[in-house]
Image (cartoon, rainbow, N blue to C red):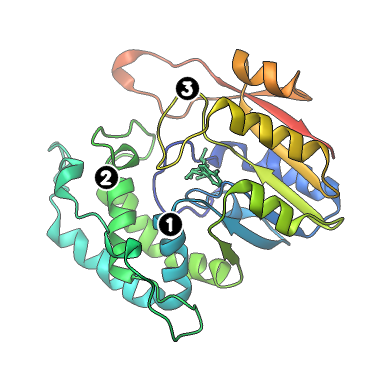
């Protein structure tokens, strides 16, 4: 299936979307709350949902607000970047340090338009580029089944009108998960939770053991429904969360032809649906 996606992102959840949709449909809810929204790959592909997208990283939140605000300008900037950056086949992508980083979002907010804070569209374009061209903007390149960054970016540009249609209907939040869950918990809510990995420091904010404990304590007491997916067979997480409701295996699509086939990825599902 040709899912919508905006940029490469460490831990994006494209392969398990059908299983998330299945649980969401069985829950009978309409309000889909993507607590750790990241690149938006899950929210972008939920059908018949009223979406609340959330992430603690202001850079990601600026990106989705910029899509709501002026996706045509974002498209023009991305088209321009196809000529500016060296995407030539066979040459290494530029180091992350060469891709401009967005600073302005940390400056005091502007006010006066319907967004409260005016999104920085140029910064949003830089975010898409930075993540698409190097793993999490951290310098090393991705091993993925989608070949060149330039081809990937062209496809993103062609998907932008459909992405804009979806994102313009979202409520976008920039909250810590504790505050988000308290604010949105209700009988009609479905929370999808894809928390940061326990062993990898991939994000601008990562999780400590106490965060996983706080998360499961909150989930055990909510009025709404939830689905949480994490890597299976992680001892730390099993100690904190207990046995998963079920485990599913997914083909690892990030194969490197030179290093043999990678084993499948095992995902643990925790749900009250
Ligand atoms: C595994 S990624 C989510 C990936 C996402 N499902 C996707 O498909 O792109 C986890 C996300 O949680 C965010 N995050 C980290 N700490 C958080 C917190 N305390 N509250 C909310 N979001 C947080 C990170 O910025 C990161 O984007």
Q: Secondary structure at mark 1?
A: helix
Q: Residue furthest bottom?
A: 112
The C terminus, quarter of image: top right
Tell me the mark number nearer the camera, choosing from 1 and 2. 1
Q: Which residue corresponds to mark 3?
A: 199
Q: Is residue 196 above or below residue 232?
A: below
Q: Is residue 7 above or below residue 164?
A: above
Image location of residue 135, percent across then percent down: 32, 37
Camera sees residue 87: yes
- Say few, some or many: other residues with alpha carbon within 10 Å of mark 1 (under 14 / 14 to 19 / 20 or more): some
Q: Where residue 174 appears, x then y in whole percent?
A: 53, 58
User: Could you tell me if the residues under marks 3 and 2 are in contact, i.e. CB atoms within 8 Å?
Assistant: no
**Ligand 1 within 8 Å of the CB at mark 3:** no
- Return the disc, 3 or 2, that comes first in the chain's sequence: 2
132 lies above or below 65: above
Q: Position of residue 179 (x, y in %)?
A: 65, 53
Dot label at residue 58:
1
- Give the secondary structure at mark 2: helix
Compare residues 145 and 25 and report the one nearer the observer: 25
Q: Dot 2 corresponds to which residue?
A: 133
Density class for disc 3 (Cα within 10 Å; few <14, some 14-19, many ≥20) is few
């Amino acid at each position: 299936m040709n899912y919508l996606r905006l940029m490469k992102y460490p831990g994006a959840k494209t392969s398990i979307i059908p299983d998330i949709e299945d649980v969401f449909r069985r829950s009978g809810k309409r309000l889909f709350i993507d607590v750790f929204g990241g690149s938006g790959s899950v929210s972008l592909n939920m059908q018949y949902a009223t979406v609340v997208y959330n992430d603690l990283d202001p850079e990601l939140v600026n990106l989705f607000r910029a899509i709501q605000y002026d996706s045509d300008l974002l498209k023009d900037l991305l088209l321009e970047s196809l000529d500016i950056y060296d995407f030539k086949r066979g040459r290494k992508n530029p180091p992350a340090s060469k891709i401009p980083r967005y600073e302005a979002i940390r400056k005091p907010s502007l006010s006066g338009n319907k967004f409260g804070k005016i999104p920085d569209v140029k910064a949003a374009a830089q975010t898409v580029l930075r993540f698409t061209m190097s793993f999490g903007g951290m310098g090393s390149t991705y091993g993925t089944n989608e070949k060149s960054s330039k081809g990937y970016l062209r496809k993103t540009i062609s998907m932008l009108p459909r992405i804009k249609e979806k994102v313009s209907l979202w409520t976008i939040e920039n909250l810590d998960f504790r505050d988000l869950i308290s604010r949105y918990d209700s009988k009609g809510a479905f929370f999808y939770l894809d928390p940061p990995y326990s062993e990898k420091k991939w994000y601008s904010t990562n999780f400590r053991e106490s965060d996983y404990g706080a998360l499961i304590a909150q989930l055990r007491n909510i009025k709404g429904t939830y689905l949480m997916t994490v890597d299976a067979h992680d001892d730390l997480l099993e100690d904190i969360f207990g046995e998963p409701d079920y485990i599913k295996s997914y083909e690892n699509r990030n194969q490197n032809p030179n290093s043999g086939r990678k084993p499948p990825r095992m995902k643990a599902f925790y749900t009250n649906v």
